[in-house]
Image: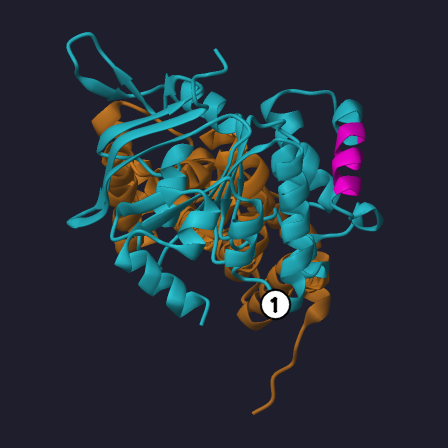
Amino acid sequence: MSEIPLIQVRGLHKSFGKLEVLRGVSFEVKRGEVMAIIGPSGSGKSTLLRCLNFLEEYQAGEVLFDNTLVGYRDSAAGRRKLDSERNIRRIRARLGMVFQSFNLFPHKTVLENVIEGPVVVKGQPRAEAEAEARTLIARVGLTDKLDTYPSKLSGGQQQRAAIARALAMQPAAMLFDEPTSSLDPELVGEVLEVMQSLAADGMTMVVVTHEMGFARRVADRVMMMDEGEIVELTPPEQIFTKPESPRTAEFLRRVLH
Amino acid sequence: MSYTWQWQLIWDFRQVFVRGVEVTVMLTWWALLIGLGLGLLLGLMRSSRLAVLRWPAAVYIDIFRATPILVQLVWIYYALPILLGLQMGNIVAASVGIGLHAAAYIAEIFRAGIESIDRGQSDAAKSLGMGYGQAMRRIILPQAVRRMVPPFINEFATLMKLTTLGSVLAVNELLHEAENLINNTYRPLEVYTIVAVVFGLMIYPFIWLSQRLERRWKTRG
C-alpha cells in the first residue's frame, strides 16, 4: 500500500474560458515527500495546487489522492460526472491548505479558528478539540495569542495560526500556496521555520514558493513550472546547480539575482 | 397670523395614538419577519452559481423594486383574491404586501453583504472540508451580517414608515387612526406633529444601536 504515491496527477488540463492554465501536467508526490513548486507568476503553480483539493475544477486528466479520483466519478461507460459534495469534502478535510493571504476567520480568535474544522467538520467534542488545538498553537509559538483576534496579529503570526488551523484536521498532506509572499521580509523566517519542522516530522507537503533557499534546503524535489507545463522536476541540488532547461536557468538567474 | 396650538385636546385622545402604535408595531413585525426570511432566501439564490436559482430571484427582485408599493398593496389585497381565490384580511394583506416588497430590498442587502466577503474566506472554509451550508452559517454570514447592519437598519426604518400605506387598505395603523382623529377634531397640525414624533421615537433607538454596533465591531475588526 505505502508504495502507492499519496498524490498522483496525470495529464491535468485546466482552462479559465479560453485561457489554458495547465496543459497536461503529470507528477506524483510520495508519502512524506516535500515538493516545492517554483516558476514565474502566471505559470499555473497556484492553480495546480488548487486542483489538488478541488478548489478549482479541472477539464481533463486526473488527480488521485490516496488512490481516489478527486472531484469526479467515472462511470463504467467512461462518462465523467462531478462527485458528490460529501466525497469532495471528505478529501478536502484530509488535505490541509495554507494560503498566501492567510484567510483566517476574522470574527474568531486564534483558538476558535483552530478548533473550527475539528468541531464543525469532524464533530469532535469541543473540549477535546481545544486541548489538541492548544498543543498545536504551542507548536507554532502562539500560546500567548490564544484569545487574540487575527486583526491584532502580525502577518507572520497570522500565517502560523493558519498553519495550526490546517494541522488541526490531522491532514495526510499539506498544501502551501505562496505562504510567505505577503509577509514583510523580517517575518518570513518564523513561518519557514514552522514549515521546516513539519517537514522534519515527515509531513507530506506541496509548497508553491518563491523562497529558493527554503526549496533548496527543505524540499526533496523541486518542480519548475512555466506556461502551464512542468519544465523540470528534480532534486534541489540538481535544479539549483545545473538546471537542464534554459527556461529554468533563466528564471533562477532572475530570482537569485 | 397666529395659530393656537391645542395640545390638551391631543392628550385627551392619547388612546387613539396608543392603538395606532400597536397596529403599526404589529405590521412592522410581521412584514419584517416575511422580509427577512424571504430576503435571505432570495439573497442566497441571487448569489448562487446555479442559473435556475439565480434567475427567479433576480426577476422577483426587479419586479418588486420597479413597481410602486402602493400598487403592490392594492393588487395583493384586491387582485390576488380574484386570481387565487385567496381572501386575506386587510392587516394580513398589508403585512404580506409590505413584507414581499421589503424582501426584494433585503435580498439585495444580503447579496451585497455576502459578495463583499473575500473569496479567501470560503476557500479556507472549503479547504477544511466544510459544506456550503456550514461555510455560510459559520464563516460567511457572521461576517457579512456586520456589514449589512447599516443598510439593514436603513431598510427597517423605511419599512416601518411604509406601514403607513396600510391606511389605503383601511388598516388602523398609526396614520390611519391619526387621520380619523383629524376628521373628528380638525386639528391636523397637532396630530401630524405627534405622528412624526412617535415615529421618530420608535425608529431612532435602532439607528442609535446600529451606530454603536458599527463602532464596536470596527475596534475588533
In magenta, the rendered stretch is A131-139
Up/down of A136 relative to B190, above or below: above
- Considering the numbered disc 1 on the image, is that residue within a helix, a strand or a loop? loop
Residue A35 lies, in percent from the top left, at 47, 40
- Mark 1, Cα crowd under 10 Å, few <14 / some 14-19 / many 20+, is few
> Which residue: 78% across, 48% down?
A142
Seen from the viewer's position, the closer of residues B132 and B52 is B132
For chain A, the rendered hue is: cyan
Q: Is residue B69 magenta?
A: no
- Relative placement, left or right, of B220 versus A174 is right
Residue at mark 1: A184
Up/down of A194 relative to A85, above or below: below
Instruction: Return the chain for callout 1.
Output: A
Seen from the viewer's position, the closer of residues A4 and A120 is A4
For chain B, the rendered hue is: orange
Up/down of B43 relative to B17, above or below: above
- Relative placement, left or right, of B179 versus A197 is left
- Relative placement, left or right, of A83 versus A81 is right
Q: Would residue B33 be seen by someone viewing this image from the given angle?
A: no
